[in-house]
Image (tube, rainbow, N blue to C red):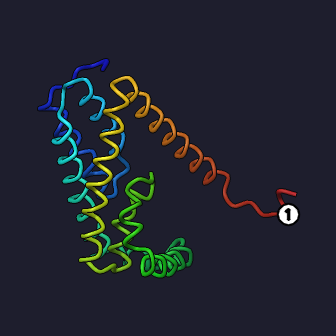
Amino acid sequence: MIVPVPAQIGYPALGALILGESAGLPLPGETALITAGGLVAAGHLTLPVVIAIAAGAAIVGDTLGYWLGRRGGRAFLLRDGWGAAHRRHAVERADRFFARYGSMTVFFGRWLPGVRVVAALTAGATRMPWRRFAVANAAGAFAWAGTVATVAMLAGPTGSLALAATGLTIGAIAVAAAWWRRRRGPRSAVAEA
């Protein structure tokens, strides 16, 4: 690794970033996990502790996100005001989707950027049953933490750094594209012709 990271800093930083991202904040939780895998390969951290902290932080963060969604997310989305029709339509679609695919979304969404940040909040807002959410959340968190940390460790310090940089670059491009699209506003087919 370019900069050695002591365990007393690495583990808490890993936990804080993953917990925040899982609770719905736009933080680089997975990038932190990839970096931690590289630190495992370099001998600065240990794989079982990285997996345990990452999974635990993901479970706690997702649980917090779920309860935020459950307690106030639905009312927030259904309120009157700017974009109310769009938000209400999105809630109707999310209700149907989570009724059918909620457990799979919570489990597999952990591997998908963007979905990882909103899955727990949406599960709570759509009133997904707590027990189903908790089982899918815990299973997904351990599977995700184990696979991502292990792949990053196997990639080595340099490979994990490349993976983390690629993830940050893709994230920056996605944010820039969303900003650009929003800035341009909706365009009609007539205007484009």
The location of residue 148, given as percent across then percent down, is 34, 44
Regarding residue 21, the answer to whether it shows in the image is yes
| Front-lying residue, 187 or 10 | 10
- Which residue lies at the image location 28% right of the left edge and 64% below the top edge? 137
Where's residue 16, x and y in %? Answer: 22, 45
Residue at x 88% of width, y 57% of height: 193
- Farthest residue in the front direction? 154
Q: Is residue 79 left or right of residue 136?
A: right
**Mark 1: secondary structure:** helix
**Where does the image place residue 45, in percent across and percent down from the top left?**
18, 31
Residue lying furthest right in this view?
193
**Residue pictured at 19% horizontal, 54% vertical:** 56
- For label 1, the residue is 190
| Picture layout, residue 103 above or below residue 20 | below
In the visual, does 178 lie left or right of 44?
right
Question: Which x, y percent locates residue 142?
Answer: 26, 54
From this viewpoint, is residue 79 visible?
no
Number of residue marks: 1
The residue sitting at the top extreme is: 2
Kind of residue sitting beneath label 1: Val
Looking at the rendered image, the quarter that the N terminus falls into is top left
Task: Please identify the quarter of the rendering in which residue 74 is found.
Answer: bottom left
Q: Residues within 10 Å of mark 1 (few under 14, many from 20)?
A: few
Residue plotted at (27% across, 51% down): 20
Hey, which quadrant is residue 165 in on the image?
Answer: top left
Quadrant in which residue 8 is drawn: top left
**Considering only vertical position in the picture, is 14 above or below 192?**
above
Vertical side of 171 occupied by 135: above or below: below
138 lies above or below 71: above
